[in-house]
Image: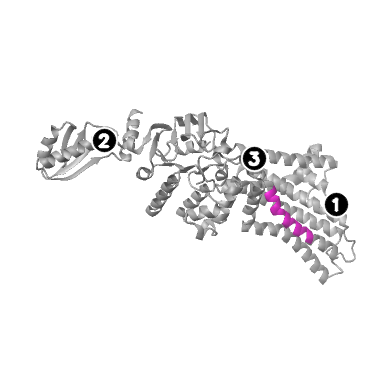
Amino acid sequence: MSALTATVAPLRRPFVPLVRADLLKLRRNRAMVATAAAMTIGATIVPYGVLALLHAFNPTHHGPAGGVANLGHGAGVLALFGSVAAVIVGAAAGAADLGNGVFRELVVTGRSRVALFASRIPGGLAFLAPLVAVAFTIMAAATVGLAGSLAAPTVWLLAKTGLWLVLELAFYFVIALGLASVIGSRAQTIGILLAWRLAVTPILVSIHALGVGRDAVPGAALERIAPQTLGEYVRQSGAVPMSMMAAVATVLLWTAFAVGLGAWRTATRDA
Amino acid sequence: MTTSLFVVETAGLTKRFGDRTVVRDVELQVPRGSAFGYLGPNGAGKTTLIRMLLGLTGATAGSMRLLGLPVPDRRAEALSRVGAIVEEPRFHAFLSGRENLAIVAAARGPEAATRIDGALDRVGLTRRADDRVRTYSLGMRQRLGIARCLLAEPELLILDEPMNGLDPAGIEEFRFLIRSLVAEGRTVMLSSHLLDEVEKTCDAVAIVDRGRIVVQGTIAELTRNGPPTLVIGSADNARAGMLLQVHKAVGDVAAEDGILRVRLHERDDRAVHEAVADINRRLVEAGVPVYRLEPEHASLEQRFLEITSRLEEAA
């Protein structure tokens, strides 16, 4: 052991290695990698592949697989399946340390609990980003390359669609991360958020009596932020008339709420 | 930070869960550079005390110092030189041993990452370091837990029931590891209910019962409670007994099962040694062949049971 009587130097604990460690935990979970890849890359390849085959075998009944309309369809499918993947990844990032009993091993290092929580955000996003990038690249290539007689999407529309997909998936990732950090259970987090995303959101959006209260439903806000050209294709529930400002505020407030709650619970829970 | 005489100091430390007091007014002092046993029956509050020291749960009342630093106020600084295993070491089973260490090293700081190979080597896991932890035996996980502690280059290791579930070879290996860590100048505080192992491993202990420390001191002090006793075996116990009853150092003599149990007046080590030598000389000079002469020590287990049963009677 190096000089026990030496004065201890001030602690130097950079944040980036923590992010890398969180990325490692996600990357090495093979089942989750396969699931997330299937729900992003797979969910893009399959629809465009099917559309391309249908068009190839029966071009009179089935139009080209590309074009703006199919960009909308593809973006809708990727938003739906990708958000499920984001929930799964967020739940794993938020609850894996707790579930495996490793959280206390990290706490006894003396590292700030808030830092332990915060590093999961870039770690998880770094895990999701390549999957979304690959899926979106395939989508962009298919909608442009297979447009045939249809109008191909412009670069600007593709960029807006890509950014919107990133926002959609990042949002559900952060919500899942925050919730998993609060309740400490991966399975419960996934169950709650899938029910919210797939069942509760469409119901709330369809209740017109809620009035402006529907602006607070994040699914409706995310659909409002989607590029208008994609229109109905990316909408899984009825349109809620709200301003862009209100939609952005809704997304930001939910994100801040989830992050704040997750950080608070991580900092205060018995480890 | 590193000059305090005691690596762990608590004053009036108390933890309550609702109406139930799990740790009660604990005054603990763990001397630097020793192997210190924190002994108690199951449910005595050993793990809760350790969890408070490490900031895993808050204290209801009282104060604590780790390596001379007040915690939780300077917890990060104190824990940067503390390694700990609470209950059993836990890992991400789908990661390798090396990857699990890398995750903790990331939390500890850049120097910790440079110690991974050395720590794995120290606990004999280099060959299996890249295997997934789910393939490790319990003993290997315990050793990996120690390797994880060593990433901190710790002055203090706090090990909660580290020998639970280990086979005899594993226990012996662990004992050797703990003693080697102490030999390097580190302090090891371990909680356990395996009294025999603690007696073999530790220099000092505290015995805790129902959340309260009932006695603490060195193993020698605790096992030598009351006047020292000699066990004597000779070819003529009756004559030996008569001779010893008039010896000035002897309090009383009792014959039982073919031996004599001789209680001495002296308590000082040097005086006891002289009395033993004199007793031996007198018996031999009197023509009594002596084939056995040894001091009798109460084992830690005897003392522990004595103390805890006394408390049960008082309750």
Tell me what residue is drawn at x 67 percent, y 38 percent. A261
Q: Is residue A235 visible?
A: no
- The C terminus of chain A appears in which quarter of the rendering? top right
**Amino acid residing under circle 3:** Val
Residue drawn 82% across the image and 60% down it: A140
Q: Which residue is mark 3?
A: A114
Nearer to us: label 3 or label 2: 2
The residue carrying mark 1 is A231
Q: Range of the magenta residues?
A: A122-137
Is there any visible trace of residue A165 in the rendered image?
A: yes
Q: Main secondary structure of the magenta part?
A: helix
Membership of A131 in magenta stretch: yes
Query: Spatial distance from mark 2 to mark 1, Cα to Cα?
Result: 96 Å
Q: Earlier in the sequence, mark 1 or mark 3?
A: 3
**Disc 1 chain ID:** A
Query: What is the spatial separation of the Cα atoms under label 1 and label 3, in whole angstroms?
Result: 40 Å
**Mark 1–mark 3 CB contact (< 8 Å):** no
Q: Percent from the top left, x then y, of residue B8? A: 47, 35
The answer to whether residue B130 is above or below residue A255 is below
Image-based side of A182 in relation to B47, left or right: right
